[in-house]
Image (spheres, coloured by chain):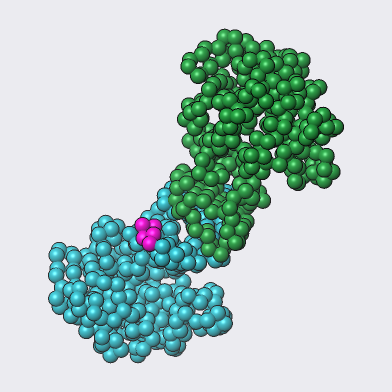
Chain colours: A green, B cyan
Amino acid sequence: MSALIIPVILCGGAGTRLWPLSRAARPKQLLALAGGESMLRATARRVADPALFAAPWLVGSGLEAAAREVPEAALLIEEPAPRNTAPAIALAALAADPGALLIVLPSDHLVRDAAAFRAAVARAAPAAAEGWIVTFGMAAERGETGYGYIARGGEVAPGVHEAARFVEKPDAARAAAMAADGRHDWNAGIFLFRADAMLDALARHAPGVLAAARAAHDAARAHGAWLHPAAAPFAAGPAISIDHAVMEKAERVAVVPAAIGWSDLGSFAALHAEAAQDAAGNALAGDAIAIDASGCLIRSEGPLVAAIGVSDLVVIATRDAVLIVPRDQSQRVKEAVAKLAAEGRGDLL
Amino acid sequence: MSALIIPVILCGGAGTRLWPLSRAARPKQLLALAGGESMLRATARRVADPALFAAPWLVGSGLEAAAREVPEAALLIEEPAPRNTAPAIALAALAADPGALLIVLPSDHLVRDAAAFRAAVARAAPAAAEGWIVTFGMAAERGETGYGYIARGGEVAPGVHEAARFVEKPDAARAAAMAADGRHDWNAGIFLFRADAMLDALARHAPGVLAAARAAHDAARAHGAWLHPAAAPFAAGPAISIDHAVMEKAERVAVVPAAIGWSDLGSFAALHAEAAQDAAGNALAGDAIAIDASGCLIRSEGPLVAAIGVSDLVVIATRDAVLIVPRDQSQRVKEAVAKLAAEGRGDLL
């Protein structure tokens, strides 16, 4: 590699799936869910390799808190409105030199093996330099219905496969079949590409996205490292994910299978699975005691939590809210969030 | 009745069985566990019948908060040290005229039918005036092992039975047998007696208790309505319950069966049983939401509690502590209290 890869860290998304830990004003990427640092800080540290990566860019809205977590950020692109990932990535591609390599990274995922991650990126870089849009495929360990799947095609370079097909959020039977056949990977939302390749793909497959992003970019205000794209044209554009807008349609899309210890920590069940557990399978964090409990995730940022005689329960306590839900129903937190929203309890969301 | 009965409300006892609601500095009798007023205030209101009762006396330690709840108290006897109920009752008997009728009342029990309670007291008063120590027997509805049982003997007056035997905290088989045979009542810790009858019984069956209380009383300091018995002799005396010291041994002990809607609210399971419940059997108090939950007691004095998909669970939240325990194990709260004590977390107790 000659030129350094620019990490583009996506900081959008409030993430209510981890309420009451995550809040509108304290999104998931700012939480220290695994270890002592925020997910965002860990993401930035993962790309702090000056042999491979340039200083990161951040894209999102209300980036002040994110900027404090990533003081080394070279560019901070304020999303004028939430429009999902395609417009955000378009803004980054427009801000880069046409031949620059960008790697798009979610800011709130866990990657246990940073060295393996960097090795996968290095493996993918030549293909990206040739114009491939490269995704990174996580071994599909189970028939998860909430993820996107990528069917591996033929190898175009060592460890780099053509992406034969994208399947977004399949039903349970199809997910199980794909997880079992050994030819599918989970789409982790990590993308490596040359800026002009992404802009070309957007022009072809999502011209409305590109037009809105370009209009916003052309009328942007810059202030130091901060770039404020114009709000009106950006907000007028479509809201669509990069998967739907580009990945499922573009020609030269590749997948690099990567065993990097990935989890999106997208539920309390996932958080429990990734956390250190005691002999009874309890994962405790903060001021918590468990007596004759097993399989529980207990986490407090405020009051002491004392759990006695309970199994497979999630208990999350903050200063102003406490969630109790069976671990295997932890995605139902959204029902509580919806109820609170309906009751006008925005102070708790 | 000619002379009014003096209610002697016992305000001792921290009551850790309802932790984290009850605390050392906020004992159970100061909590509003059933309705909007404290248990102590409800107790005082129950005897606010000038045809039957004189102004109440309070006995306990650190009575300032109790005094605020019962501003009509005529005498406040500060226990210099916790010595269980017999010494406290001895202090009250010593402070009364020898012929006065005293009724000893726990300050933290629920009595739903105050009229039935007063009727039972009126029924018992003639026997007490004759020198009987009268207890009030609550119908033993189930084989509760944590209570004392009284075997009803022959009737000595209408609705007044000789107490044939006291059985303190029987094992489960014996408790079940007593609950089933229709001849046993629960001892609710409510006692009606002439002061001199109690002093005579103490002199005979617990002379050490009486000697210590008398020494403390004789050296007491009085200040307005407050009586401060001398600490040293009181603390040097034995710690023993009135049941063990007197009731199980004295000759002329009677029991008045009384259906007064009584509960000692001695556990969260009892609190759940006595609380208003929704159609799914949930009893919610404070800022709490239950989604697809059943049979739960959820009570918050601080953070919002959101419980989803759980059954028969107790969740108690305060600003600094949250308890989660299955309802049928709610007495295990003492294990959490013991653990916190062992860890030096007195701030939470």
Question: Is B349 left, or right, of B220 in this rendering?
Answer: right
Name the spot of residue B25 as percent of width and height, x first.
Answer: 33, 59
Quarter location, residue A107: top right
Q: Residue at x 41, y 66 (%)?
A: B342
Question: Is A176 left, or right, of A235 in this rendering?
Answer: right
Q: Which of A114/B56 is in front?
A: A114
Question: Is B214 left, or right, of A38 in this rendering?
Answer: left
Q: Which of A257/A208 is in front?
A: A257
Q: Residue A9 magenta-drawn?
A: no
Q: How many marks?
A: 0
For the question of whether residue A223 can be seen, the reply is yes
Quarter location, residue B53: bottom left
Quarter location, residue A116: top right
Image quarter of the C terminus of chain B: bottom left
Name the spot of residue B131 as percent of width and height, x first.
Answer: 29, 85
Q: Residue at x 26, y 63 (%)?
A: B62
Magenta-colored segment: predominant secondary structure: helix
Image quarter of the N terminus of chain B: bottom left
Query: In the figure, A62 relative to B183: above or below?
Result: above
Q: Residue B347 magenta-drawn?
A: yes
Name the spot of residue A88 as percent of width and height, x first.
Answer: 63, 22
For the question of whether residue B110 can be seen, the reply is no
| Magenta residues, start to end | B344-348
Query: In the figure, A300 relative to B60: above or below?
Result: above
Q: Residue at x 18, y 74 (%)?
A: B230
Name the spot of residue A218 as percent of width and height, x first.
Answer: 59, 9
Q: Residue at x 62, y 29 (%)?
A: A52
